Amino acid sequence: MAVYVLGHKNPDTDSITAAIAFAELQKKLGVDAVPARQGDLNPESELVLKKFEVEVPELVTDVTDKQYMLVDHSDIKQAPDNWDKGELLAIVDHHKVGDITTPNPIFFCAMPVGCTGTVLYKLYVDLYKKEIDPKVAGLMLSAILSDTVLFKSATCTPDDKAVAEELAKIAGVDDMMAWGMEMAKAKSAVEGVAPKDLIFRDYKDFNMGGKTVGIGQLELVSLDLVANMKDDLYEAMKEVKEEGNRHSVFLMLTDIMQEGTELMVVTDDPSIVEKAFGKPLEGRSVWLPGVMSRKKQMVPPLEKAFGA
Amino acid sequence: MAVYVLGHKNPDTDSITAAIAFAELQKKLGVDAVPARQGDLNPESELVLKKFEVEVPELVTDVTDKQYMLVDHSDIKQAPDNWDKGELLAIVDHHKVGDITTPNPIFFCAMPVGCTGTVLYKLYVDLYKKEIDPKVAGLMLSAILSDTVLFKSATCTPDDKAVAEELAKIAGVDDMMAWGMEMAKAKSAVEGVAPKDLIFRDYKDFNMGGKTVGIGQLELVSLDLVANMKDDLYEAMKEVKEEGNRHSVFLMLTDIMQEGTELMVVTDDPSIVEKAFGKPLEGRSVWLPGVMSRKKQMVPPLEKAFGA
């Protein structure tokens, strides 16, 4: 029976590539593993798979009666539909410990590093002592560059950088920063994309103090790219909030070069912004200098503010 | 600030020794780690610490405002008091994924093996490439012998056996099976112990379908040891059920030599036994041949029967 390996909903480059890389590792360990994805590729992930000539994983959104493994999340909200009606066999992650539980012991490895790719490298090299295929190394390297925003994110650790350098050698990528900028530009592509699709490009719902809170993020080489789209984005955020009975929807417009985030907010309680970030909302957004990581700089202060 | 390393409530030998071994590893990694315990040592753990001349860890039952790491569990019910009012930094485990969540990414490593000691060996040797002190190796070996019931338990994997052999070399234990039998005899010591203390010697509460279900286990070299104590044990089980508003209290009298368990039961719903194990309760107990592991052979069928 095939074992599906899945990243989170609205997959980013780490979720797509980690599914492929962990499935490859499992195959080397004798498991009939198949990489899968829960949604469409973003433009950056498309570029990455194309560059390293790797096939797009198959779409799997429901794991009823399936055996499966999760990468890049351990939260029910981000897991496939009917996660508890299939058999979960393993989790590899780099986020906070989520609310997924299991009836039996499983393999669970999470580390407080910037990318699932970094954890996978340690599993390949240190724990299981298996070689990494050059193409797979290229995918893992790309995930690290993406997740750590070219090593600039607050989530980036010395391990991420050291692992990226090793992976670049295996993959034969001579100038990883140039490749990272090429990816960043693909990630910044907003022209002609519907506002709602931009919100959901890299989007996660969280349960904070019993309330549903959505956080999307657009990483941009410049905020100018979205300067004349903000009205449309704001309207789309209102729709997203309404449709999902959400308490709040946040959209992080993260400027990779300026290293900060313009946070757009639609919420039932505007005071939550000052509670979380010590700065009040000005109109529909607030500028948060230095904030680049949803996981490390958005979710923890918001969870605290929501009393989650 | 000291970082406390703690096993579960009502600690067994694995919880005690894993706290010590993981604290030692953390010290080698530069962390000011202090091993701790949530309760009294059982006679087996006492014997183990004495043999390898290791100090008894300090008692810590509340982690308010403390930094801490958990070993051998990831369930709230087994965690220290106010687990969510301190900062949890790491989990090393070999049980099912429990309901503990964190606000930030942490190190979490669980493997489906027979003992936390086996996971710790892989962290020492493979992941962090640190030497294991001979005394610490002796503790980890003892935990594996204890948790796998001398490699007889259904939870025992080839990894546990291979790691035990490596640890025996490091610890200088020539005949690990003889040492395992010595431990088993210490574990079997029931003479002069109050019935309630025997129930709680190796006891865990579970939340099954919203109900509190307690499962204690006594591992015995022979059931004869408790033959004339069963009336007293049964009365004590009724008290335990009453005091904790529990739905059921199970006591596993596990015969290491016969390789099976006489399961004593006090419950609001006697039919749960047949639902879980396919055999009806006969009076106050049922004999379950081959059943030696609470984690692998008791908890999963009971959770299924309770619809948890």
Image (cartoon, coloured by chain):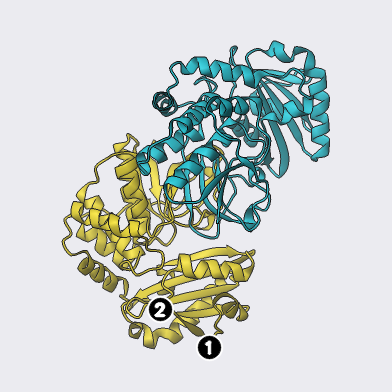
Chain colours: A cyan, B yellow
Residue B182 appears at what percent x and percent y? 23, 70
Q: Which residue is mark 1?
A: B282
Please name the amino acid that badge 2 sits on. Answer: Gly
Q: Residue at x 44, y 73 (%)?
A: B199
Q: Secondary structure at mark 1?
A: loop
Q: Which of the pair A198/B297 is nearer the observer?
A: A198
- How many neighbours does mark 1 have within 10 angstroms: few (below 14), some (14-19), or many (20 or more)? few
> In this image, A222 relative to A264: left or right?
left
The circle on residue A91 is none
Q: Is residue A142 above or below residue A221?
A: below
Q: Secondary structure at mark 2?
A: strand
Q: Is residue A307 above or below residue B42?
A: above
| Sequence order check, earlier mark of 1 and 2 | 2
> In this image, B216 relative to A234: left or right?
left
How many numbered marks appear? 2
Q: Chain of mark 1?
A: B
Please name the amino acid that badge 1 sits on. Answer: Glu
Mark nearest the camera among 1 and 2 is 2
Mark 1 on the same chain as mark 2: yes
Residue B83 appears at what percent x and percent y? 51, 48
Residue B184 appears at what percent x and percent y? 29, 71
Q: Chain of mark 2?
A: B
Q: Is residue A27 above or below residue A288?
A: below
Q: Marks 1 and 2, how far apart in space?
A: 16 Å
The circle on residue B260 is 2
Q: Which of the pair B21/A220 is nearer the observer?
A: A220
Residue B284 appears at what percent x and percent y? 52, 85
Q: Which of the pair A210/B130 is nearer the observer?
A: B130
The reply to whether residue A174 is in sight is yes
Q: Residue at x 53, y 66 (%)?
A: B300
